[in-house]
Amino acid sequence: MLSVRDFFRWYNEEHRHSSLGLLTPAMVHCGQTASIVRQRQTVLDLAYLLHPERFVRSAPKPPALPNAVWINKPVQHTHEKLTKFREHLSQSH
């Protein structure tokens, strides 16, 4: 039986998330994304060079990386209310 610790290790260090361009959270957190994407592109370029017939549409590219990742993305009006509240607090003091 998996422990919670084992699950989190797997989730953060082994599981490649589709929302992270098939990278692990650890790869993203440690700043390895650029290097890994370059390595992937090198492999895909070689595969295309050796077997272009396998790629009917175009040369392959690694999955795109997101601009932002959220667990619970804030709703815009909530952000605006929070900003106004902070302004109010700063004016009160």
Image (spheres, grey):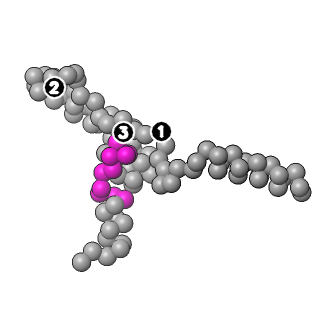
- What is the three-letter code of the residue carrying label 2? Phe
Residue at the (28%, 30%) spot, across then down = 61
Residue identifier under label 2: 55
In the rendered structure, the answer to whether residue 89 lies left or right of residue 72 reads right
Please state which amino acid type lies under the numbered disc 3: Ser
What secondary structure is marked by label 3?
A: helix
Percent x, y of residue 22:
31, 45
Q: Which mark is residue 67?
A: 1
Q: Residue at x 76, y 48 (%)?
A: 84
Q: Is residue 8 above or below residue 48?
A: below
Instruction: Find the residue positioned furthest to the front.
Output: 77
Q: Is residue 69 visible?
A: yes
Residue 50 in sight in this render:
no
| Mark 1 vs 2, N-terminal side | 2
| Label located before the other in sequence (3 or 1) | 3
Q: Nearer the viewer, mark 3 or mark 1?
A: 1
Left or right: 74 in relation to 40: right
Q: CA distance from mark 3 to mark 2?
A: 24 Å
